[in-house]
Amino acid sequence: MTQSQFTETMRENHQRAIDEATADVRFDAWIDGEAHTAAGGERFETRDPAIEKPITTVSRCGEEDVDAAVNAARETFEGEWGELTKSERSDAILDWAGVLRDHSEDLALLESLDTGKPLANAEYEVGKALDYIEYYAHIVRGEQGNQVPVADDVHAYATQEPYGVAGLIVPWNYPMILTSWKLGPALAAGNTVVLKPAENTPLTATRIAQLSEGVLPDGTLNVVHGFGDEVGAPLTRHEGVDKLSFTGEDRTGEVVMKAAAEQITPVTLELGGKSPFIVFPDANLEQAAEIAADGIFYNTGQSCDAFSRTVVHESVHDEFLDLFVEEAAAREIGDPLRDSTDFGPLASEQQFEKVREYVEVGKEEGATLAYGGEPIDPAGDSEGWFVEPTIFDDVDNDMRIAQEEIFGPVASVIGFEDYEEAIEIANSIDFGLASGVATRDLSLAHQAADDIDAGTVWVNQYGRLVPGTAFGGFKRSGIGRECAKETLEKYQQTKTVNVALDDPELRPRDE
């Protein structure tokens, strides 16, 4: 097959997929159980980054639409949704998850087209997202209040109640799965929701809301599309929002936190990362190279927990680097809709330009470009935002490429001489979201896990998250945890009831 033939096939494949995914579906906002046209009547495009063509248009919402969504959520919280028992609420969420599972292939296709991630990855992530929603629907059934022993003449107990209306803001890199991390506990705890998906990737959020029709009470799940200053800002400062949860860049997290402070709104923040992966000299180097590659090249490096700093002992540096480069070269770059593809485009032109800029920064800072770093045209004459997997060697930990979050497939290899230096490098960063360790020595693994300042430490693996394991960061990587039982508590507030008891007295039965 010639390059031009492959290009035509890629474009044709994507156009057919776009036609299939958007047939008979209009992507309006979703408010009070129905499609909602933005007050201004404006719409904006969401584009396929593999071919840089429009997929469809979505409503461009504003403050008036945010008000409508919050009001709908409030009315339902104080009405039908708030009147359900935990078991009834759990049943409704599980019924909705069942509908979503019936449409999982359609959701995965939308996710792949909207983000550029390989379809196989999107299929896996949709399945995991539904696992999280179901997890919270199940565990809420087991919640119990706490009786507090105060005194013989007092009965004191504590109950957990939902906040009310939860405002949820999710990013563009994992739209479906990160939405589920917030929706699952928010709904299970008894809140209603106003969800703002990223403007780059709004499609799966809209579709799952549409698929809640007739399953969740109208107004339980509301979706408003739009840009940060037009929708995100009004949502974060809205006096009718009782709980905020935001995932995104740390500077934006500051803005969200300041807005929340004006209303004294509790907030969960899952922010950036610059995760270290420490390769100790006793590690299985082939395995470590594979883990390092998965850690920085999965989802084209667009992961907050990506292993963007590979910290390697000097005695195994050269051997490891050769293996790491081999792993990078083995990634098949191409059409996300092809089964063989494991490395797709970056999600947008903006992200593409950002990665290219950081590659130049790395060269200017004196790092050695060991592999990649160039735009690539996997199909010939492609207009998509593809870039090669990139590895820099001879990186100092104080370089910009080692300190700043690139959010792309750019790895920085940093050498170390002893254990203390490895830990110092790992911790000498503003972030503390995730980290990794490669070693065969369990004592060393546990010691490093204790000493690394990060919310997650993976030992001889990358990215394994399952419902029940808390995920969140130290330092500028955020506040609070997601994915675990404790997350449910972040969407609830505690009420203490203290009842004075009279001395027991037998009273005659009233005639």
Image (cartoon, rainbow, N blue to C red):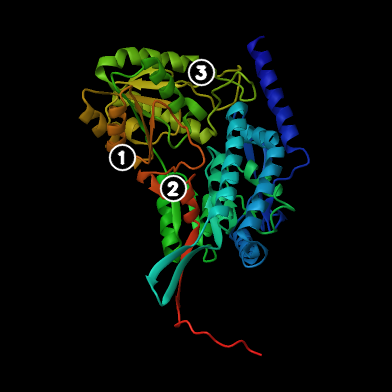
Label placed on residue 453: 1
> Could you tell me how far apart the alpha carbons at marks 2 and 1 are, in whole angstroms?
15 Å
The location of residue 213, given as percent across then percent down, is 73, 52
Q: Does residue 46 appear in the picture of this structure?
A: yes
> Tag 1's secondary structure?
loop
Label placed on residue 331: 3
Which quadrant would residue 445 be assigned to in this image? Answer: top left
> Could you tell me how far apart the alpha carbons at marks 2 and 3 are, in whole angstroms?
32 Å
Looking at the rendered image, the disc whose residue lies closer to the viewer, 3 or 1, is 1
Give the camera-side residue of 279 and 367: 279
| Residue 295 relative to residue 97: left or right | left
The location of residue 288, given as percent across then percent down, is 38, 20
> Could you tell me how far apart the alpha carbons at marks 3 and 1 are, in whole angstroms?
31 Å
- 102 lies above or below 367: below
The residue type indicated by label 3 comes to Arg
| Residue 6 relative to residue 239: left or right | right
The residue type indicated by label 2 comes to Arg
Q: Which residue is mark 2?
A: 481
Give the camera-side residue of 199 and 128: 128
